Amino acid sequence: MKNQWVQAHLTDAKAKLPFSFIYDGKASAALLAKWPKKVHTTKIDANRTWRALIRTDPKTGLEVRCEAVEYADYPAIEWTVYFKNTGTTNTPILENIQGLDAQFEAGAKGDFVLHGIKGDFQSAESYEPYRLNLPSGSSTNFGPHGPIWAASGPLYPLGSSLGMPGTGKSCDGPDGWPYFNLQTPGGGTIIAVGWPGQWAASFTRDADTGLTVRAGQELTHLCLKPGEEIRTPLMALLFWQGDDVVESQNLWRRWYRAHNLPRIEGKPQPAITFFCGGGTEQEQPIVQSWLDAGIHLDVFWRDAGGSRDDVWFTLNPDPLPYPWPGMYWMNSGTWEPDPKRYPKGFKPYADWVRSRGLQFMLWFEPERVGDPNSWLGKNHPEWILPNDHFGAILDEGNHAARQWLTDHISGMIESQGLDWYREDMNGGGPCPAWRKNDAPDRQGITENLYVQGHLAFWDELRRRYPRLRIDSCASGGRRNDLESMRRAVPLLRSDYTMLDSGMADKLAGVIEGNQCHTYGLSAWLPFHGSCVSKPDPYAARSHYVPCFGAGLQVTPENQTAVRRVYDECRQVAPFVLEGDYYPLTRYSRESSDWIAWQFNRPEEGDGVVQAFRRAESPFVCAEFRLRGLDPAALYEVTNFDVVGSTTVCGKALMEQGLSVEIKEKPGAAVVVYRKIK
């Protein structure tokens, strides 16, 4: 399927190129067929081949370059299209640029079904799976738009947010997840849009058996100045055969781990545990108490802080008031440690942390200049784009601004001893600021140059510091598109998890909502993180994912429970990160249901089952038919809450099922298994 698609759209002499645009009022298909062309091909490694398809307009000098990478070990192809003005004057208007514009066929008796999940919007509904039929004549649209709420939920149904205000945070809102699984009879295609900005995707059925899929930057209507270059989002397709959508997602997970998960010194990012605190030398005994209690930690996390006395960076003498008490961290724009609280900076603390085998991470939000009297606000107002609220935006498309940011953060990495760079983006997002800065004949240019600058900034940090790790954050999990995920990992998948901190008794369903986040997100991102505020098994086990932390203090009374929580998660997390994922129940947020899933590593012959009985479920026991096992093998099965283990045949686990008993309401069970012969 992949080979046929590549031939039809990229390599044939008369290939129908998988992208489109309008140039000087004319459709690209007619123009590109007449322009002189060049083709370059290079073997990157044993599994990847790079090719560039170049067309140049002889009249205006517009160069259109499609750079594609074809994979040999997976049925995957990806490409990005670049537009460069090689002439000496401004180009005519270039508009409606679609990084993906292709026709899919379902066959005479077939139909199209679209599978995916919702984006993040700090809700129990974040990452909820959906299954949409695409009937003849229908049009379904997606993009990052913050939800407008009523008492009953978002005011627009799934797939219909086109025209709503964009945020520019790539995974924002119910329609904001930039990954899709398009199923047709006998197989399908997984589609990913890599763009940490305001993208748009549409699925339009004709009256017959065809479906046109388009995706790209949401708004483009611009001329290019001499020497200027813009690009489309990264587009990736992964093809699959059969009728098992779950197995198609596991093919995606395997390709993602093999070719997308960030690597340090050639090794993919492993699962981690963390502790979040203030980062002062006076806090060292607190961290030491965790280590003395036998709690294994990987990362010390210094976040923004909250109150005026807890913000780590310098505030001006009269910081701006905000509508929420204690939100002084929103007065950003001076990225230097507060000399009163940190007269020596973070370096002594970071060195102390590393001497105990931990890594040090520090929070930044460099794109949002929340304080006009900050260092950036006072010294470089020409770098700043006015925004609607939550502070102006530092223009990363401005070369001088990006150079300053790169050098300054580099200086902080060195002087403060950072192992992790945590980057946040709060508020309504940068899209309003981008749009306000564009002239009528330059719509979309600010965003495009900004996104290129943002990715170049991350790339340069990683080049300068090969061991540096980056945490993506944008009010939680709202910037986790494929381009971002190749450079960073989301240590906190949603700010909704923070509602679990001190509010779980007041907000019903928060823990269950986090169970649902794992259920939906695991089909797409093998690595994601969460945090729990209580060490009881039901709450803690609802957060066992590759990045895990507990937002609480260790005391003599609770240290045994906290140590058990961290020890359990360290056993479970590698399965979540490395295994194939199988939902064992339907998705549900209802308090009367069970919810359960399995992660299986067939090469290693082991895996885990996580099951939850909610507070109003009348059922004490459930049976789950496991998947991906060797039916002829024997497996040692161990329940975390039961002494000893049992030996069960793989065939029995797959056909009769694994029996799980949970007496408590609510309650949770974790069962691990390994092949013994």
Image: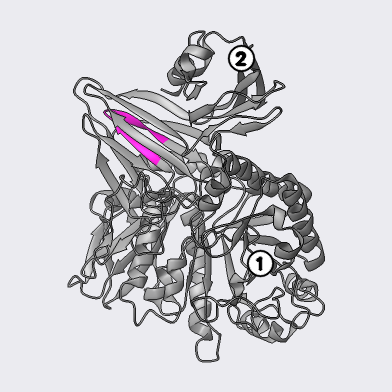
Residue of label 1: 372
Dot 1: few (<14), some (14–19), or many (≥20) neighbours within 10 Å?
many
Seen at 24% across and 60% down, the residue is: 623
Predominant secondary structure, magenta span: strand
Query: From the viewer's perspective, is the residue at label 1 or at label 2 nearer?
Result: 1
Mark 1 to mark 2 CA distance (whole Å) = 45 Å
User: Magenta residues?
Assistant: 180-190
> Is there any visible trace of residue 59 in the rendered image?
yes
Q: Position of residue 214 (x, y in %)?
A: 41, 31
* Cβ atoms at labels 1 and 2 below 8 Å apart: no
Horizontal and vertical percent position of residue 575:
47, 56
Q: Where is residue 628 in the image (x, y as percent from the top left)?
A: 37, 45
Instruction: Give the image quarter of residue 259.
Output: top right
In the depicted structure, whether residue 291 falls above or below residue 464 = below
> Which element carries disc 2, helix, strand or loop?
loop
Amino acid type at circle 2 is: Asp
**Secondary structure beneath disc 1?**
loop
Q: Which badge, 1 or 2, comes first in the chain's sequence? A: 2
Depth order, front residue of 458/189: 458
Q: Is residue 75 visible?
A: no
| Mark number, residue 57 | 2
* Residue 1 sits above or below residue 464 on the image: above
